[in-house]
Image (tube, helix red, strand yellow):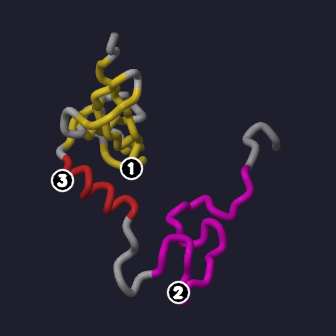
Amino acid sequence: MIIFGTSSKLVQLAMLNLLCGFCGNPAAHALRKRVTKFSLFFIPLFPIAPAKHSLQCTFCGAQSEVSKENAEQMLAQGQGAPPAGQPAPGQGMGGVPQQPGAQSGNPFAGQQPQNPYQS
């Protein structure tokens, strides 16, 4: 008796901050890749279909398929190095670490939280 079939593996490649095309909210999107393989005795052996890439919005849950080229481009932009001559995020000029929240675009960085219920 031979036991065979298929198995699918879903791999999360990255979390990207994008504007959702369905709900219109800026939210994190999970970039995922699904690979389907032929299995013999519950051991995945080789892929039987091309990998499928998808994006899922964490705000509304909408999912859309993207091409391999678009997925690779989004992955390179999301995890890529900064352009030449610019410091990495969290680094000041010359590679010196910045204070948390300093020049990060957060207007409330460095402020103590205020309790609106205390006078």
Mark 3 nearby-residue class (10 Å; few <14, some 14–19, many ≥20): few
Please identify the residue farthest to the right as the structure is shown.
119
Quadrant into which the N terminus falls = top left
Query: Badge 3 is on which residue?
Result: 69
Looking at the image, which residue is at 32% across and 14% down?
2
CA distance separating discs 3 and 2: 34 Å
Mark 1 nearby-residue class (10 Å; few <14, some 14–19, many ≥20): some
Query: Badge 1 is on which residue?
Result: 16
Looking at the image, which residue is at 37% across and 59% down?
78
> Residue 61's x, y, as percent?
37, 28
* Image side of residue 112 versus residue 4, left or right: right
* Image side of residue 14 versus residue 95, left or right: left
CA distance separating discs 3 and 1: 16 Å
**SS under mark 2:** helix
Q: Which residues are magenta?
A: 87-113
Query: Badge 2 is on which residue?
Result: 93
CA distance separating discs 1 and 2: 26 Å
Q: Main secondary structure of the magenta part?
A: loop
> Residue 62's x, y, as percent?
31, 29
The image quarter in which residue 55 lies: top left
Looking at the image, which residue is at 39% across and 50% down?
17
Of pointers 3 and 2, the one earlier in the residue sequence: 3
> Residue 10's x, y, as percent?
38, 34
Three-letter residue code for mark 1: Leu
Looking at the image, which residue is at 35% across and 43% down?
31
